[in-house]
Amino acid sequence: MSRSFDLLVFDWDGTLMDSAGHIVDSIRAAAHDLDIDLPPEQRARHIIGLGLVDALTYLFPSLPHADYPRLAERYRYHYLAGDHKLSLFAGADQGIRAMHAAGFSLAVATGKSRQGLDRSLGASGLADFFHASRCADEGLPKPHPDMLIYLMKTLGVDPQRTLMIGDTTHDLEMARSAGVSALAVGYGAHARANLEAHEPVACVMSFAELTGWVRQNG
């Protein structure tokens, strides 16, 4: 059977790593440290996947500009204090290994910093299975298509042979802007209904289902 895609690009937080809840808790803890109003959980979940600067600006638009570096520092403090407790979603380790063995090129496009992604890749044991990655501090963050454009150029894959896999509307908007198909995962940061409104090729509710979809349709 002929293959539809050569390159599978994964978001990290909320797609491979079960970290959305910890990100929200860290944002709210950072706001508490600066004695500013805590954002509601759903509003905080909306920014997952964006670069940190864009995320904090969206959540705290009235914060004095001079306070953003302090807020970012407190967020990183709280996130790093608990990131060693995070784990991959059930089935993600086996699924990534199976897709790699099947001959797909695998990549990561993430709102994490390079330092943060490298730490997570090393801790997860998946570093050797990805052929390329792009982070928010290396170019333009989601939903701009820059990350996908960079990854496709680096790996020599055309947009029609590329599939973006992510748990947020930012991932799906980035894919559309890059002319790339998108597979949504409904077990992460954004609600399934919001994801499906962006018309992905499918919306899966577990990593096992994701792996099965790729096996049958990828």
Image (cartoon, rainbow, N blue to C red):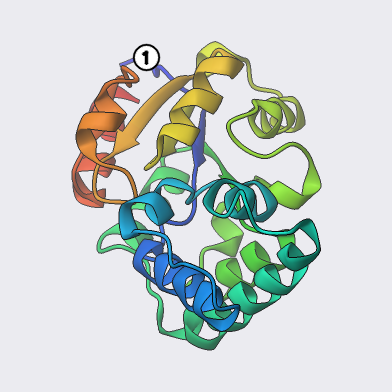
Amino acid at the residue labelled 1? Ser
- The answer to whether residue 105 is above or below residue 179 is below
**Callout 1: 10 Å neighbours few (<14), some, many (20+)?**
few
Viewer-side residue, 152 vs 134 = 134
Q: Quadrant of the C terminus?
A: top left
Q: Secondary structure at mark 1?
A: loop
Q: Quadrant of residue 79?
A: bottom right
The residue shown at (53%, 72%) is 31
Q: Quadrant of the N terminus?
A: top left
Viewer-side residue, 137 vs 194 = 194
Viewer-side residue, 102 vs 147 = 147
In this image, 178 relative to 87: left or right? right
Q: Position of residue 183 (x, y in %)?
A: 35, 29
The residue shown at (39%, 19%) is 3
Q: Quadrant of residue 212?
A: top left
Q: Position of residue 6 (x, y in %)?
A: 51, 25
- The answer to whether residue 142 is above or below residue 111 is above
The residue shown at (59%, 63%) is 127
Tell me if residue 37 can be seen: yes
Residue labelled with disc 1: 2
